[in-house]
Amino acid sequence: MLRDGPMIDVLRITLPAEDDFEAWRDAARGLAEAGVPASAVVWQVEGGDADLFGGDVAPELNPGPGPGPSFAVPRGFVDLAKSAICHSEPERFALLYALLLKLKGNKRALEDRADPLVDRIEKLAKEVRRDVHKMHAFVRFREVAEEGGTRFVAWFEPDHHIVRHTAGFFVRRFTTMRWSILTPEVCIHWDGVSLTESPGATRADAPNGDPVEETWKTYYASIFNPARVKIKAMTKEMPKKYWKNMPETALVAGLIAGAQAREAVMIEASAAMPKAQASAGDNVQLSWDALRDEAAGCTRCELHRCATQTVFGEGPLDAKIIFVGEQPGDQEDLAGRPFIGPAGQLFDAALEKAGIDRSTTYVTNAVKHFKFVLRGKQRIHARPDIAEIDACRWWQEQERGLIRPAVTVALGATAARSLTGKTLTITKAREAPLVLADGGECWVTVHPSYLLRIPDEQRRREERALFVRDLMRIRERVVGLA
């Protein structure tokens, strides 16, 4: 590296990678042994900009005839340097070299915490360790089918050059999985045997979700406790920059938005209620009232802009059956109650034939606002899209979480999508119950409005009979569970 030759102004050291501790160590040791001052060295990474920590150097600088005697450094410096060198600070190489020179003259220099150089490098290392902790905590893998089996892929955006540094953690933790972690700078891949890397990627290269993620989101929402929300503490530990990588954080904004209002309502009502009258049922009613009031101001999707009002569910909060429809229709939108239009009347008649008293059931919709297109003055029903279904899914999950029915019934494909997170074929799905992510039992059948749209009279009678049959099977199942 250093050689006899003419006078030079500066020594430019080029490292292969931003986080290459070994290359920096070898270069720094050679420079230090040769007695080269920190101000005489410019560090840079191959393909990157130079570190200008040293500034201008004297034209008479000469590195000397060759290396001097070797020297030892404390183990603590090696550990400190391995972390600090992963920082994104461009001056880190020069700072570490300056500290190395101090240690050459004083082996106890690292113990002087008041030294501004030591303090600065300690802070760099601390920030890197925190970034590593965030990567350990906030990487979320999504399952992807590929040739040869399944691979789990995650997207992460670190603040520093920590991906190679922390790869071993993921290899040890997920040894039997085939996985990839994509980042803007470098991607790492594990095939169960060896670790490889590839150039950086973009967020678009990573998958958006998988069935396991839907299960986790349901669980997360069900355990969310509004009384324990500490927004500042949560965002400090889980900064918003990581939210887009994590499935549960898609729920956080909505969970937080109503948590304090719901908590306040519950506390106020509980305080006004004599202790002797308080019960679990009272608490459920208070929570439901707060949830309904919160939903009245829902703006999770664009449907609220044109609809008259939110149409929330109704029925006893100890119901054994919850019926989930698609969305309110024109009459429901105006009245603010579910299933009161033509489809609701057909639904009531079918329930009566099946021996189910509607007043004992809870009825709601997957989407709480009416979606329509105008034809003249008439508002014509339009089917909600997947984004609108998913945006509104939180409400029915909260309703089900409060009521905890023995059976949930999906009336049509939209309700089935809201409850399961999947697109289902009604003909196949209606033959046997499904198990939901929270362990609940779900039966699938057609939506009553489908029966109204069948033009052929004979086929309409047959389909209505099948609908009543489904309802009777559901009634028998609930009796059996009881």
Image (cartoon, rainbow, N blue to C red):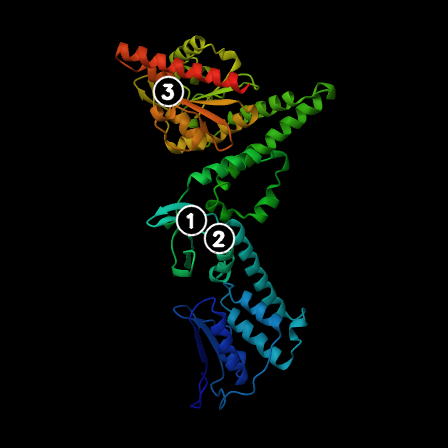
Q: Residue at x 36, y 15 (%)?
A: 466
In this view of the protein, which residue sits in the foreground, 201 or 309?
201
Residue 123 — which label?
none
Tag 2 secondary structure: loop
Residue 164 in picture, x, y percent from top left:
47, 62
Residue 440 in picture, x, y percent from top left:
50, 28
At label 3, the amino acid type is Val
At label 2, the amino acid type is Phe
Q: Is residue 56 visible?
A: no
At label 1, the amino acid type is Phe
Where the N terminus falls, by quadrant? bottom left
Q: Report which residue position mark 3 lands on.
A: 446
Q: Is residue 260 visible?
A: yes
Q: Residue at x 36, y 50 (%)?
A: 205
Q: Are marks 1 and 2 in contact (CB under 8 Å)?
A: yes
Q: Residues within 10 Å of mark 3 (few under 14, many from 20)?
A: many
Tag 3 secondary structure: loop
Q: CA gap, disc 1 to disc 3?
A: 36 Å
Q: Report which residue position mark 1 lands on.
A: 152
Which of discs 1 and 2 lies nearer the camera? The answer is: 2
Residue 363 in picture, x, y percent from top left:
48, 18
Q: Report which residue position mark 2 lands on.
A: 174
Rendering quarter of residue 279: top right
Residue 479 in picture, x, y percent from top left:
52, 16
Q: Residues within 10 Å of mark 2 (few under 14, many from 20)?
A: few
In this rendering, the answer to whether 75 lies above or below 419 is below
In this rendering, the answer to whether 19 lies above or below 138 is below
Q: Earlier in the sequence, mark 2 or mark 3?
A: 2
Rendering quarter of residue 102: bottom right
Tag 1 secondary structure: strand
Q: Earlier in the sequence, mark 1 or mark 3?
A: 1
